[in-house]
Amino acid sequence: MIRVIDFDPHHLTVMALQDAQAWMQPLLDDRHIETLRGHGKAWTAVDDGGRVLCCAGIIPIWDNRAEAWSLISGAAGKLFVPILRAMRRELDAYPANRIEITVETDFEQGHRMARLLGFECEGTMRAYLPTGRDCDLYARVKE
């Protein structure tokens, strides 16, 4: 079972990111974390023991366009379906017509998650990440 609670920057300091996102841990300094908290909507999924499994949110870009983000713990595996359901509820409730996400081009589980959440791939962005790696842009557009 999971509970969805308000995001707190402390959650990112106690969560061990999944292997595919572990390279991002050093980038999560106070300034970046405050940006995630201070813009848009952000939430955290915790298990029954209070362990942080996922931090996620949606940041508005302009009217009717936003960008979603998620940082997921390596311990989220068995509770990933309820986490996905919570993400879908938040995405469905968000007022923007277009929500975008980026997924590392070689991260197949991330592509699967994007499709399960109703996103469609729009193309590859070369050398998008600070590491120089490529990402694919996905969008979820309300009709």
Image (cartoon, rainbow, N blue to C red):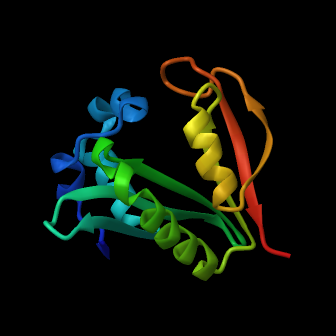
> Going by the picture, which residue comes out furthest to the right?
143
Tell me the residue at 49%/24% (across/down).
130
Left or right, residue 42 beside residue 132: left
- Residue located at (60% from left, 78% from top): 94
Is the residue 98 above or below the residue 67 in the image? Answer: below
> Which image quadrant for residue 61?
bottom right
Image side of residue 4 versus residue 134, left or right = left
Q: Is residue 53 left or right of residue 105?
A: left
Q: Residue at x 59, y 71 (%)?
A: 91
Left of 39 or right of it: where is 89?
right
Expressed as whole percent of the image width and height from the top left, the position of residue 1 reads: 30, 72
Asked if residue 130 is positioned above or below residue 136 in the image, the reply reads: above
Q: Which corner quadrant of the image does residue 136 belong to?
A: top right
Q: Position of residue 100 (x, y in %)?
A: 67, 55
- Where is residue 57 shown, x and y percent of the image? 46, 63
| Residue beneath the point at 72% across and 56% down | 119
User: Would you place residue 85 above or below residue 95 in this image?
Assistant: above
Q: Quadrant of the C terminus?
A: bottom right
Instruction: Work out whether residue 141 or residue 116 is closer to the camera in this orientation and state it.
Output: 116
